[in-house]
Amino acid sequence: MTPRGVAVAALLVVGVSIELACCIGVLVMRSLYDKLHYTAPATTIGSLAIAAAIVVEESFGQAGIKAILVFLVMLVTNPVLTHATARAARVRELGRWQPGPGTLERETGGAGDGPAGGGRP
């Protein structure tokens, strides 16, 4: 086996192992919020390793560039989708999700964040 083949196999083992571990984590966790934590490594580390394996195997041809683009799309969209999912779950559980009057002060423990107690008007 060539060094290139070994590198591709190692990257694929790492990538698929991370994806499998993340799938098991999503399956085992009880809370939706706990499950959301397992999507990050799957879309960052796992997909990076798989994309790198494709680039090592295929070079920067059509397949290599597509692999990089798919990785970048996953890297950018995962935080947005995770936040939207968590927000939708909170709205479903608690109803309207907007801070009411005085909520910020109660959560931060003070009158405001600004200088000299300026806070929000």
Image (spheres, helix red, strand yellow):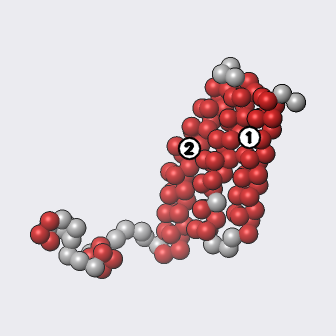
Q: Nearer the viewer, residue 19 or 92?
A: 19
Residue under the point 63% across and 35% down: 70
Name the residue beneath numbered marker 1.
11
Q: Is residue 98 left or right of residue 29?
A: left
Q: Nearer the viewer, residue 38 or 6?
A: 6
Name the residue beneath numbered marker 2.
75
Q: Position of residue 17 (x, y in %)?
A: 76, 52
Q: Above or below — where is 27 with respect to 77?
A: below
Residue under the point 61% across and 68% down: 34
Q: Is residue 89 left or right of residue 2?
A: left
Q: Residue furthest top?
A: 61
Does residue 121 show up? no
Split into 4 quadrants, where in the image is the C terminus?
bottom left
Q: Is residue 82 left or right of residue 106?
A: right
Q: Residues within 10 Å of mark 2 (few under 14, many from 20)?
A: some
Does residue 71 show up? yes
The answer to which quarter of the image holds residue 28 is bottom right
| Amino acid residing under circle 1 | Leu
